[in-house]
Amino acid sequence: MNKTFDVAVVGGGAAGLAAAIFLKRERPALSVTVLEKASRVGRKLLSTGNGTCNISNMHAAPAFYHGGDVSFVKPALEAFPPTAAMAFFAEIGVICRPREDGRVYPLCEQAAAVLSQLRAECAARGVEEVTDAAVTAVRPQKHGFVLETAKGTLQATQVLVTAGGAASPSLGGTTDGYALLAALGHEKTPLFPAVTQIAANSEFLRAVKGLRADVRLSLRLGEKTIAESTGELLFCDYGLSGPAAFAISRAAGDWERKKQGEMTAVVDLLPDWTAEAVEREVLRRRALHGRTMEEFLTGLLNKRIGQTAVRAAGVPLTQTAEELTEAQAKAIVRVIKNWTFTVSGTKGLAAAQVTAGGTKTDGFDPHTMRSRRVKGLYAAGEVLDIDGDCGGFNLQWAWSSAYVAAQGILAERRGDA
């Protein structure tokens, strides 16, 4: 390759592409290259929101983020909030709209369109995109850096590492960014999966495999509830998936790496009903003459879920409704309101959408994303020890951290910092 650039961006994901655009918008003469390990940029972006691209969340704030120092996100979110992200995307041709729950999606609901416009904007502004160019080393020198890549050596005055996290290696997840930053003196925290499926054990899961229900899902460590969410749950033969599981799966991932105590997942199939109301309804249903327990909960719950709940309560499906005892009724209520599964862990980083953990943030300035260890080095996005809740928070962190990193790079070039 043997080229020299003002700025080399290592990683062509959401943060890397956005940062390149931010740099070129303010300094068109700046030479910027995006180096991507894969054969194309933005592969992971294509999968976000099941292909619809949940681009941000209007409620983005430190309370929805995790890491060794959650306050680290505050300057970036304030400098580039969700409204700024929506305005930025509108400028490059992607019109976005927030939903009632705060999640922001492109009007077209196509992640491919978001990536297409990011790439088009990069190209229009003269960003050099280089794929199949895994960066194997970043070496500081007197006036910048030498970068060793799969396509040869190049030089850059400043380097921004946006190589992402280890989650979803099939979509480009990698540990390369952590290794590059570690070689430059930065430390990494343990990695574990977030926004992923929860693995659980139960003889009844296979019976409801593939079914969805709006529930309240809790994770309990011993008797203590440590995480809770409300939303759609997908039952799988290996455990629990869907938005409700994704929202609290970080706690399962953290427990999985420590394995201290016993974790259970508790499903409330009727979260809007009190236990007393459910019991009254179950007892009332004893008057459904001619019904067996096979149809007992049909019309209250999904038929197959209802049948499985009855079985989980230890009540034979062949029994008639009239024969239901009060003790059996209470057992059914307990399953409906507290269906409990033993958690064994998660489906791992390979299946996760987000990596929890990463390069420690205390080695970077939160206002600029500038390294406190190496002059001219920056990092943004998932490679840092910051991860957000499910619902657009992680992409907002990508845009916000990319923006302040770009501003930090430009300030350093001006001699302002």
Image (cartoon, rainbow, N blue to C red):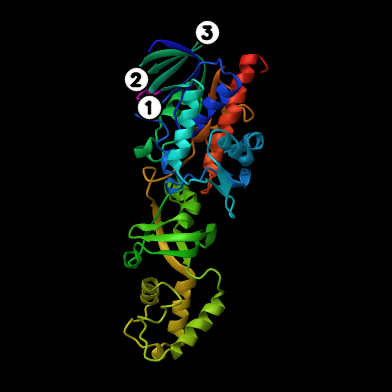
State whether residue 316 is above or below residue 92: below
Residue at the location (34% across, 57% down)? 238
Amino acid carrying label 2: it is Ala
Q: How many marks?
A: 3
Q: Which residue is pictured at 47% across the width and 69% down the height?
A: 269
Label located before the other in sequence (3 or 1): 1
Q: Provide the residue designation for mark 1.
A: 37
At label 3, the amino acid type is Lys
Amino acid type, label 1: Lys
Residue 308 in percent (x, y) is at: 36, 73
Image point 61% across, 15% down: which residue? 413
Residue 150 - label? 2
Report if the CB atoms under discs 2 and 1 are less than 8 Å apart.
yes
Report helix, strand or loop for mark 3.
loop
Determine contact: label 3, label 2, CB under 8 Å.
no
User: 377 or 265: which is nearer to us?
Assistant: 377
Q: Earlier in the sequence, mark 2 or mark 1?
A: 1
**Of callouts 3 and 2, which one flags the residue occurring earlier in the amino acid sequence?**
3
Q: Main secondary structure of the magenta part?
A: loop
* Residue 387, position as x, y percentages in the image: 52, 41
User: Alpha-carbon distance for marks 3 and 1?
Assistant: 26 Å
Q: Mark 3 to mark 2: distance in Å?
A: 23 Å
Determine crowd level at label 1: few under 14, some 14-19, many 20+ residues with C-alpha closer than 10 A: many
243 is higher (above) or lower (below) than 188: below
Disc 1 element: loop
Numbered circle sitting on residue 142: 3
